[in-house]
Amino acid sequence: MNDNAHPAPGHAPSGDPSPGPDEPDPAAIARRIDERRGALGLSEAELAAKAGMATRYLQHLAEAGPTFDPGGFLRLASALGLSHRELVEGRTDPPPGQGGAPEQPVLVRLGVRECWDRIGDHGVGRVAVPADPGPAVLPVNYVVDAGTVAYRTAPHSAAAPDTGTTLSFQIDRIDEKLSRGWSVLLAGTAEHVTARREIDRLNAHPGSEPWAGGDNPLWIRIRPTRVTGRRVGSL
């Protein structure tokens, strides 16, 4: 098929043009194309060039849906940095916060004990460490140990700052359906755990195995000097 060709008159099927229950919705797909194009900072002409088609053909492809030209749609998905399924059905793992704010939002500061209660004894959080040209924020599996937070990493990795380095650690949870959530922030210093007894105890702690796998023998302990938190909800 020539991408520069105009669609033949009467291509659309007769009857109700709305998609069936198992068919992709072209209007929703067109919105995803525009939103993704905007997020990438591409003009319509730039996106068409990346996908190897004329701008007019791109417009028609977005209106007609993926069944009109499956090959062209694959090129379009690739140009947008999405899989074919993500473009057709939407992302199955969108970032949090896609819903709207609650009707009567309220921000509540958490006490130190409330913060530790929400952190629990292990989970996944984000550590912010000094880096060049700016701080690096990295997800890590953590465990709580005697008023500190510890995580495993590889020596000399980005998540392995020197002992005494100032850093911060954040844990949060979001309820998309109810538009509420909480966030806890720890600020403190890093410490390399070297005592064999401490390492063995941390290795045996529930949740100590990194999700990313690999050899991560170095435990970093964060001794917090400040623990703060906030909760967002509604009246």
Image: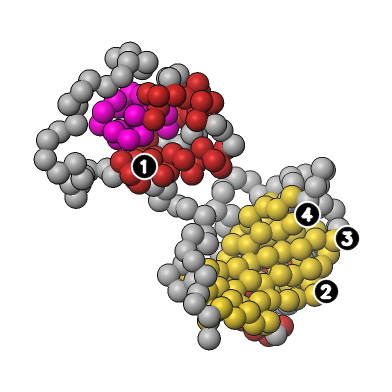
* Residue drawn at (68%, 65%) of the image: 170
For label 4, the crowd category at 10 Å Cα-Cα, with few meaning under 14, some 14 to 19 and many 20 or more, is many
Q: Nearer the viewer, residue 159 or 7?
A: 7
Where disc 1 sits, the SS reads: helix
The picture places residue 93, in percent across and down from the top left corner, at 45, 52
Confirm or deny contact between disc 1 and disc 3 (CB under 8 A): no
Query: The disc labelled 4 sits on which kind of residue?
Result: Val
Q: Earlier in the sequence, mark 3 or mark 4?
A: 4
Left of 78 or right of it: where is 136?
right
Mark 2 to mark 4: distance in Å? 16 Å
Confirm or deny contact between disc 2 and disc 4 (CB under 8 A): no
The verdict on residue 76 being magenta is yes
Q: Nearer the viewer, mark 3 or mark 2?
A: 2
* Residue drawn at (58%, 66%) of the image: 123
Mark 1 to mark 3: distance in Å? 50 Å
Q: Can residue 233 be seen from the camera position used here?
A: yes
Specify start and end residues of the magenta stretch as a single range.
60-77
Where disc 2 sits, the SS reads: strand
Q: Nearer the viewer, mark 1 or mark 2?
A: 1
Q: Nearer the viewer, mark 1 or mark 3?
A: 1
The label on residue 129 is 4
Q: Which residue is mark 2?
A: 225
Q: Nearer the viewer, residue 225 or 88?
A: 88
Mark 1 to mark 2: distance in Å? 49 Å
* Residue drawn at (49%, 71%) of the image: 179
Mark 3 to mark 2: distance in Å? 12 Å
Query: The disc labelled 2 sits on which kind of residue?
Result: Thr
